[in-house]
Image (tube, rainbow, N blue to C red):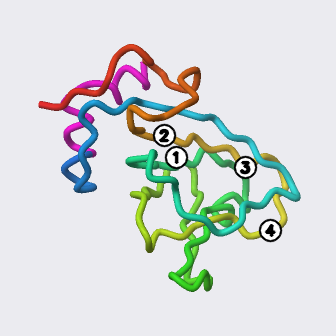
Amino acid sequence: MFAQALQRPEVAHEFAKTCAIDVAGGYLRMEYIQDTDGAWLEPHRDIPEKLFSLVLYLCTGPEAAEWGTDIYDMQRRWVGRSSAEFNSAVIFVAGPDTWHGFDPRPIKGVRRLMEINYVQLSWRDRDQLCFPDQPISVL
């Protein structure tokens, strides 16, 4: 049902308008991620095929808010961290100045998140798409 809601033209339109991106003709991709202690992700920018990335945090526990995405400047220097408080989110639009990652830190429990993307037609891993035969349309 959640994927169906994100596929709806009016929802895609609001994300497109809010993020100043064109999602028409793209596809919805969703990935459930679980990280445990020792997890990390080097600073990177999203590939151009990802039109939009929303990381929805589903973390619980007393230290979960500290498990958010790390944000870096263009020289890859750490500048801040999003909160990973349950039901919070961070959005990235692929670009030259959207460096992010996950610096190593203790995870007591499981860091749970959902990555939601609108991706271009050129996305190669079609099996990752929620509706591979239904491109996004907007109002």
The secondary element bearing badge 3 is classed as: strand
**Vertical order, 29 against 95 (above or below):** above
**Residue hosting label 3:** 111
Name of the residue lying farthest toward the top: 133
Earlier in the chain: of badge 2 and badge 4, it is 4
Q: Amino acid at mark 1?
A: Leu
Residue 22, horizontal then vertical, whole percent: 24, 45
**Residue hosting label 4:** 104
Do tag 2 and tag 1 residues touch (Cβ < 8 Å)? Answer: yes
Q: Amino acid at mark 2?
A: Ile
Earlier in the chain: of badge 3 and badge 4, it is 4
Inter-mark Cα distance, 3 to 4? 12 Å
Q: Which residues are magenta?
A: 1-15
Crowd class of label 3 (few under 14; some 14 to 19; many from 20; radius 10 Å): many
Crowd class of label 4 (few under 14; some 14 to 19; many from 20; radius 10 Å): few
Earlier in the chain: of badge 4 and badge 1, it is 1
Earlier in the chain: of badge 3 and badge 1, it is 1
Would you say 39 lies left or right of 52 here?
right
Name which residue lies at 62% across and 44% down: 113
Name which residue lies at 59% across and 34% down: 31
The secondary element bearing badge 4 is classed as: loop
Inter-mark Cα distance, 2 to 1? 8 Å
Inter-mark Cα distance, 3 to 1? 11 Å
Q: Which mark is residue 116?
A: 2
Residue 70 occupies which quadrant of the picture? bottom right
Do tag 2 and tag 3 residues touch (Cβ < 8 Å)? Answer: no
The secondary element bearing badge 1 is classed as: strand
Inter-mark Cα distance, 4 to 1? 19 Å
Q: Which mark is residue 56?
A: 1
Do tag 4 and tag 1 residues touch (Cβ < 8 Å)? Answer: no
Earlier in the chain: of badge 2 and badge 3, it is 3
